[in-house]
Amino acid sequence: MLLFGAGSFSSPLWAGTCTISALGLSFSNYDPTSSADVTGTGSATVNCSDTGVDILFGFSVSISLSQGSSGTFTTRTLKQGAKSLGYNLYLNATATGTIFGDGTAGTGTYAICYPGLLAPCSGNTGQSGQAYSVPVYGRITAGQDVSAGNYSDALIATVTF
């Protein structure tokens, strides 16, 4: 199970306020003898409200995820004591391609645009004061020799705006 940190962040008066809360992402059982990868889906919930001039011009937010206990985006690790199981998180539903990270080392972040009265949005569009679900897609690669048990990792989700 993955746990995402949650928090509340605010910017200067012209940029609104945002909160993020996260649910865990769970994978189904991993079989070390199987040649099939295991995938899972989870989400984080972002709720932003505009204040001041952003009511007119809108604003954008970026959601990023930390590396977790592995200290790298290349392969994150689920852990059970000293045992580890490699996995990663992605921005697309196939759980391949761009790794969901902080925008460094080839990773990407998830962007949400909140439109203003004078500025429309395209892409992932949120509405002020309404919850927006940010999907998170995970994959554990096949072929890892691990013993049975509950493996977990903890990441920090950050909203930047």
Image (tube, helix red, strand yellow):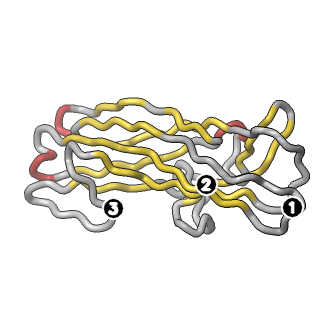
In the rendered image, residue 139, in percent from the top left (x then y), is placed at 67, 59
Q: Which mark is residue 124?
A: 3
Looking at the rendering, which quadrant does residue 52 occupy?
top left
Nearest to the eye among marks 1 and 3: give it: 1
Asked whether, in this view, residue 157 is left or right of residue 107, the answer is: left
* Marks 1 and 3 close (CB-CB < 8 Å): no
The secondary structure type at the circle numbered 1 is loop
Closer to the camera in the image, 29 or 132: 29
Picture residue at 56% right of the left edge, 55% below the top: 41
Disc number for residue 143: 1
Residue 56: mark: none
- Find the distance from the CA under tag 1 to the CA under tag 3: 35 Å
Q: Earlier in the sequence, mark 2 or mark 1?
A: 2
Secondary element at image label 3: loop
Q: Please give the name of the residue rendered at 79% of the width and 47% of the height, measured from the top-left corner.
A: 85
**Label 2 belongs to which residue?**
89
Please provide percent x and percent y for residue 49: 21, 40
Residue 36 lies, in percent from the top left, at: 78, 68
Q: Going 18% across and 32% down the picture, which residue do you hit?
A: 13
Pointers 2 and 3 in contact (C-beta within 8 Å): no
Of marks 2 and 1, the one in the foreground? 1
User: Which amino acid is tagged 2?
Assistant: Leu
Quadrant of the drawing holding the N terminus = top right
Spatial distance from mark 2 to mark 1, Cα to Cα?
A: 18 Å
Give the distance between the C-alpha atoms of the residues marked 2 and 3, in whole angstroms.
19 Å
Left or right? Give the position of 39 relative to 151: left
